Amino acid sequence: MKQKLFELHERKLQMLINKKPIKNDRNDEEFHAFERRLQSNDKRKTEIVKGSTTVRITKIEDQSIHLKNALYTCHYKWLNKQYDRFFLEERIEHRKARFYRDELVDDRIVDFNEIGNEPVPSVDEQRSKESFVYDRLAAVQYAERWWNSANPAYKNFDVNCTNFISQCLHAGGAQMRGYPNRSSGWWMEQNNWSFSWSVANSMRSFFLHSKTGLRAEVVDSAEQLMPGDVICYDFQGDGRYDHTTFVVAKDQENMPLVNAQTYNSRMRYWAYEDSTAYTPNIKYTFFRIIDDTSSK
C-alpha cells in the first residue's frame, strides 16, 4: 500500500520536473492545478530542477473485506531555480486513498474547511496603548521554525492557517488584547481565543479596523509586501475569506513567497494558482503590518 502511494507521488513529481502533466480522470482538479503551476512557473522563469517525496500512512480504515481507505501525508520537496537563484519549497498534503483488492482506485486531498459564522470582531482601543515595534525577523524565524509542526505553547486546530499567522505575529512582538470577549481584539489565553486570532475572515476584519497595537494597512499589490506581512484569500470570490499566509521571502521578481499551515507549505508562491481550492474568482487582500516606527 505505501509503496503504491509512493510510486503515485513520484510520478507526479516527475510530471512537474519534466513539465508534462498526465491527465487523471479520477481527479481533474489536481490535473488543472498541475497545469496552472507549470504556467505560473513559466511566467516566473522558474523551473523545478529536482525534488523528493515521502509518504507516511497515519490510519487504515477497513470498509469491507476488499475495500480499504488509507489516510496519509505526503511531504514534497522541490528545488526551484529562478534565474541564477535556487530556493527550496516544501509542502505537506493530507490525503485519503482508496484501495480495492489492493489496487489504488482513488486518491485525493482531504478537504479542510473553516467553520462557524463568527461575528465581525470589534476593536478594543482602550488597551495596548504602548508603542508597538514589529520585529519582522523574529516573526519570519518563527514561521520557518513552525511551518510544519504545532507549537505546544498554543492550542492548535485541524484548520490552523490563521492561528499559525497569529503565532508568527505574536513572535514578532504583537501584544494580545480584548480577552475574554471572543468578538473583541486579538488574543489567545487560558484555552480560549478571539475569532480574529483563529479565523481568516475575522483576522481580515480585525486588520481593517485596528488603529492601535497590532495593525495593518492594505496595499495594492503583492510586490509591495515584505517578509513579515500577511495575505488573505477569498478562493470563491464571495466576500468570505478562507485562508491566510505569511510572507517569509521575496523571489527574483520581487514577488512574495509564503509559509502556511492547514495544508502546510514553505516558500510557496503567494498566488496559490496550483491549489485545488483556486478558482478564477479568487480575491486577495494584501496587508502590510505597520508599527510605531513605520513611515506612511
Image (cartoon, rainbow, N blue to C red):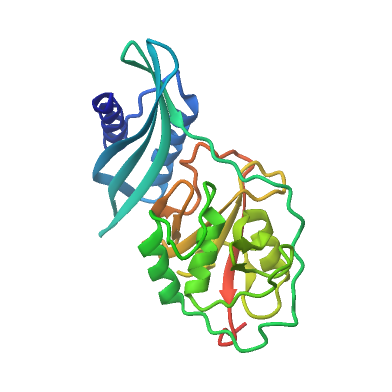
**Residue 120 percent location from the top left of the image:** 76, 59
Q: Residue at x 67, y 44 (%)?
A: 237
Figure check: 134 above or below 11: below
Q: Residue at x 43, y 61 (%)?
A: 152
Q: Residue at x 66, y 63 (%)?
A: 194
Which residue is farthest front? 190
**Residue 155 percent location from the top left of the image:** 52, 59
**Residue 97, quarter of picture:** top left
**Residue 286 percent location from the top left of the image:** 59, 62
Residue 271 visible to the viewer: yes
Figure check: 192 above or below 33: below
Figure check: 60 above or below 270: above
Near-viewer residue (198 or 16): 198
**Residue 253, quarter of picture:** bottom left
Whether residue 282 sits left or right of residue 87 in the image: it is right
Q: Looking at the rendering, in which quadrant would you find the C terminus? A: bottom right
**Residue 57, quarter of picture:** top left
Whether residue 79 sits left or right of residue 277 in the image: it is left
Near-viewer residue (3 or 218): 3
Residue 34 visible to the viewer: no
Whether residue 82 sits left or right of residue 213 in the image: it is left
